[in-house]
Every structure is written in C-alpha cells, then in structure tokens.
Image (cartoon, helix red, strand yellow):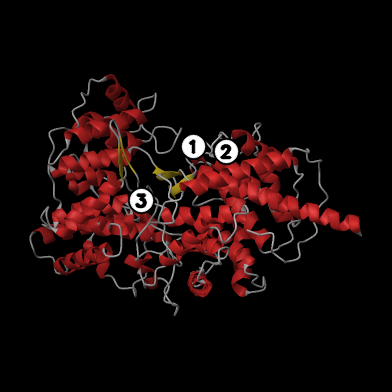
Amino acid sequence: MLTESDSRVQPEQPAPTARIPSDFRARAQAALKRSQDFLLAEQKPEGFWVGELLVDSTLVSDTIAYHHWNGKVDREWQRKAVHHIFAKQLPDGGWNIYQHGPSEVNATIKAYLALKLAGVSVKDARMLKAREVALHFGGVPRMNTFSKLYLALIGLYPWEHVPTIPCEVLLIGKWFHVNFWDMSNWSRGMLVPLAIINHFKPTRPVPVTLNELYPEGIHERDLALAPDPEKISLRNFFLWLDRVHKLAEWFAEHRIHPFRKTALKKCEKWMLERFEGSDGLAAIFPAMLNALIALKALGYADDHPQVVRAVQELKKLEHETAEDVRIEPCFSPVWDTAIVSICLRESGVPAEHPKLKRAAEWLIEKEIRFAGDWIHKNPAKVEPSGWVFEYNNKWNPDVDDTAMVLLALRLIPTDHPAKRDECFQRGLKWMMTFQCKDGGWAAFDKDCTKNILEKVPFADHNAMLDPECADITARILELVGYEKWDNANRQIHDAIDYVRRQQEADGSWYGRWGVNYIYGTWQVLRGMRALNLNMEEAWLQHGKVWLESVQREDGGWGERCNTYDDPVFKGQGPSTASQTAWAVMGLCAFDDPANPALQRGIEYLCRTQNADGSWTEDETTGTGFPKVFYLKYDMYRNAWPLLALATYQQIFDRAAAKKNGEAKR
C-alpha cells in the first residue's frame, strides 16, 4: 500500500486511455470522506474495530441438538432459534451454506433435526419440503463424518459406522511420516475433543428419529463408508485401518487396550492446556462445542470451572434478540482492526489521529510472545511473535493476520515508536520463517501438505491440510515490497516464482481465504506492484485483462462461493462492494487512473454508497473451508471500498504530478 510519501521510482506506465470527467474525482473524494467518517465512528472505546461474522444456520442447529443431548433446553431460547432456522429456509425447502447458494445436505438435515427436536411437526408444510430436499440429496448416509458423529451422540446413527478418531494419534511422534502435527491447526482443535468423545461414546438418546431421511430404509450398505472401486488405494487402506481401530475400540471398552489410558490422558491434558490464553478451545465454534461435550464425557461436573467457562465462551458467540438468535463462529477484532487502520491511514487520516494511535497501541498489545503449536512444524530459532484473528488465542497465531497487522503498524508511529518498531521487526522475522518449501506461505503452519491425510475416513470436512496459497503469499510480498526488500532476496525470488506457478490459464488466481478468483487476483497484482515489478510483463497483463473481462454491466464485480465447486462460475455473480473494491485495487496496480474499467468501478462504489458512508452487501465473500464453510465478514463491505477509493486517489495524484512535471520541462 503505497503512500504519497513513498519515494521509490515508479516504472514508466502507459499513457491514459481515456479522459477523466471533470467532476469524477470530486465525487470519489466525497465518497472517501463519508467512508472515513463512518469507520471512525465505528471504533470501540478500547481502540479496536470488529464486525460480525455471519454464517449459515448450522451453528444454531448444532446448538439445539447439543441442548437436547445435555438435557437442559431453554424453551424461550429454542423458540428464537427455531425462528432463525425457518428464516434461513430456502424456497425449495432446504438450507444452504452461503448467501443465495443452493440447498446443501448437511445444513438441510441438521436444520430438519433441530426443528424436529424443538417440537415442529413433521407434517408442517415446511418440514415436508425439507424432507423432500434431504431425500433428494441421499439423506442421512450422505452427511459428512462430523455430522454423523453428532447424530450418534443422540442415538440417531450407529457408532460402528462413524469413522474412528483414535486418541492414540497424539502418541505418534514426529519421527513418523504422518503424525498429529501434520494435520491443519483447525483440524487438531476439532479432532482432539472428538477423539475423547469417540472413546466414551456418551450417547443420550432423544425421543425422535430420522428414519424418514433414509431413501431406501436403513441398510448396512448405506451406513458403511463406500470403498474405492480400485482394490488397492489409500482410501481402502484407511478403511481397513478403521476396522482395526474399531477392534481396538472393543478392547478399550473392555479395559484391555494397552495405550488407551495414556492416550486419553494426553488428549485431556492437551485440550485443557489450550483453554488457557484462549477464548475457548481454538477460539472457534466447532472446537469449543466439541470441547464442552468432551469435558462432560470425561465426567466434569456442570459447576466445574472449566465447564462453566466453556459454556460462557460459547454463549458470548450468540446474538439474541426478542425474536431471534444467531451464532458467530468466532470473533475477528485483530483482523478487522488491522484492515480498518490501513484503510483510514491510506485514505489520508493523519498518523497522529487519536483513534489510529489507539488502534495501533491495541494491536501492539495483542502480539503473542509465546511459542505455541506452530513450533512443531516450524522449529526455526526465532523469537516468538505473531497475531491471531480473535481476541485471545495464544496457541495459534497465524501468518495472514500477522501480515495484515504489520501492514497497519508500518503506517502508524504511535507515541512509543521504539516499541512499535521492535514489535514490527519481531513480527516480520517470525512471519518470514514460515515460508514453505515451494516458496509460498500458508495460514498457520509450515509445509502442512501431506496429501495422504485427505484419504483418512474422517477427512471429509475438506480441511485436513493447511496448504500455501497465492493470496497470503502475495500479501507478504506486498509488505516486504513496501519495506524495500531487494527482489533478488532468495525468499522473495522463490515467492514470486510460486505465485507465477499458481496463475490460472485465463490469467486469474485462486483465492483461498476470500471469494474467490477476484480476491486472489487482486492480492497478487497488488503484491507485485508493491515489489515494483514491471507491470507490463505479459503474465501480469494477463491478470489485468481477466479482471476487466469479468466486470459487470453495472460497473461492479461479483463472484459467489460456487466457484469453489466449479471454476466455470469464476467472476460471475451480482456486484458487491467488497469484491468491486478488490477488483478496483487490482486494476490500480497498473497506475492508469483513466482506465475505463477502473473508472466504472469507482463510479459503482460512489453510486452504491449509503448516505451514512456505509455500503450494503448481501453476499458471502469470505472463505472458511472451501465447499464446506463460508463467512460473510460484515466489516468488508465498509472497509475495502475505502481502501479502493484511497488507492485510486494515490494513482490519480501520481499521474497528475507526473503530467505537471513533464509540462514544466
């Protein structure tokens, strides 16, 4: 993110392709000022910003099921939860996993079950439609492993057909080719409590069934996981291994399993350790709910401090009104604060502004000076640092949040510049040690890419690995570009090479953490511009042409989560403020303020801005686990457009200064 004070020599750029209307910049500046005022007013007294993370109905559905398993149902709360679930039902009767997406089997059956548990009649017209959709998808047998495990807890699915998650996985040392630490950060947080649950199988039957959601009745062939048609395959090996685990479970139940007691204790200890310094296990809903069930399975009483705390942390995620209750998967204050700080500063808010200084100080205090779980994949001798997404989660700082925080801190000196500088350099050194073998960076771990783990029976949540990706890699290159690192540096050279290899044939880049190709392409082009690469190179021009080719008739850009299922849909979808902002910034990387596509994008942002300086957006543009879980970052619709307007203003000013300089000569 180049500021007006950046003194680097800019490469020669092509002459403007069209004349800029006389009032165009004035309207853009007015929109920028309204956006600044809106965001400044949104800051919390403590100095941070946080927007709500809006997700599908499954969190509320799972919580209803949990309360019935627990035997303590607040009827008034449940009434509101039922209202929320019905409000999310689609016209065809099913439930989706992202805004305006199609019905999905897990979300639909979870909602149907929750409503049935809450007493809604199966003869209700809405339930009949839901049942039809669920059967169309193949019913209960087509649900994923974690969904089936929740069903098993309430007696609606046989444990013998739920893939085993053995506690002993924590006993396998790093000397073994595939071990616990080769799983992604988020999978570890979900799987450890599930392994405890898998051991105890604390089934508490409920007075309902799901028999009507088995298309051909309940048959053994539908319950068991289908083997690979190939006789010899990794999947078949793991299915065979699962049968061995089932035999081991039998021995464990009869107290003759040689390692189970030790493994169970280690799982319990691991989980309790990670409660400390964290807003619940891994500070995210699935792990937090799993941990609460695991505590109860271990025999912890309801009034035990750990149980009380786990309940409280889950409760904090709820938004309850007079008629509705919805649940966030986690909180995003560090991420949001860093982004908004960058947007405000880049748009011209002085570095000395009290709200910016307060935000920087808040971010500095959130640095994690603790050697968390990352040390198992990254044993580099580096001083612990890093930032997380949430308020507190000391075990799991991540690369992407750290890069965003550093992009913010470099712009705001604070009242204690020496402290800020030390923090910045420590974080930068820490982050750079996470570069993977192929030159890219991932979210939490280093080289977490052993594909064999995707073949295990419980890996159908599409998140066993934490592969490096172009969007995070480009963000890091953006940062080191602003810090004037030499492009001949080995790490930068390898990272650029990685990014180039990730480019799609049509010129776009896949976006792992944002939807989708618009997100990835924007971040790569912005990162390469920060490195001061020649933006006339063919591969970069290819990315520009792709962005221009998917602009909508209204001047905006849009893309939906279905691009993760099939890239044929890339660049297609209703225009949104956040995705238009990303595309605008991608085009700004080419320093041509008169580019007609760029002007239409700016015009779209100005035209769609609300009177109070905000934007309205009704699409899901954030990615959790592709094909499985998505998020709508409510802060995105208001933050990214400001940065887009600011970036456009910067290239306009540079072009004007260059023109004036040439005129004087």
The residue lying toward the viewer, choosing from 485 and 91, is: 485
In the picture, measured across the screen, residue 351 lies left or right of residue 94, that is: right
Q: Which amino acid does label 3 sit on?
A: Cys
- Residue on which the image places disc 2: 558
Q: Do the residues labelled 1 and 2 touch (CB within 8 Å)?
A: yes
Q: Which of 49 and 294 is in front in this view?
A: 49
Q: Earlier in the sequence, mark 1 or mark 2?
A: 2
Task: Kindly state the secondary structure of the residue where label 1 is placed.
Answer: loop
Residue at 75 percent across and 44 percent down: it is: 595
Where does residue 593 sit, x and y in percent of width and height?
74, 47
Residue 417 screen position, x and y as percent: 53, 72
Give the class, few, some or many, for how many residues have Cα within 10 Å of label 3's Cα (few <14, many ≥20): many
**Residue 146's spot in the image, x, y percent?**
28, 47
Cα separation, mark 2 vs mark 3, equals 26 Å
Say which of marks 2 and 3 sits in front.
3
Q: Mark 1 points at which residue?
A: 619
Find residue 330 and name its label.
Answer: 3
Q: Which residue lies furthest to the left in this view?
A: 254
Give the mark nearer the N terminus: 2 vs 3. 3
Q: In which quarter of the image is residue 601?
A: top right
State whether residue 515 appears in this view: no
**Amino acid on which the number 1 mark rests in the picture:** Glu
> Which amino acid is tagged 2?
Gly
Residue 399 lies left or right of residue 130; in this view the side is: right
Distance, label 3 to label 1, CA atoms, is: 19 Å
Quadrant in the rendering for residue 111: top left
Check the image and report above or below for 491 versus 582.
Answer: below
Relative height, residue 160 to residue 537 (above, below) = above
Q: What residue sits 60% from the left and 60% below the top?
A: 499
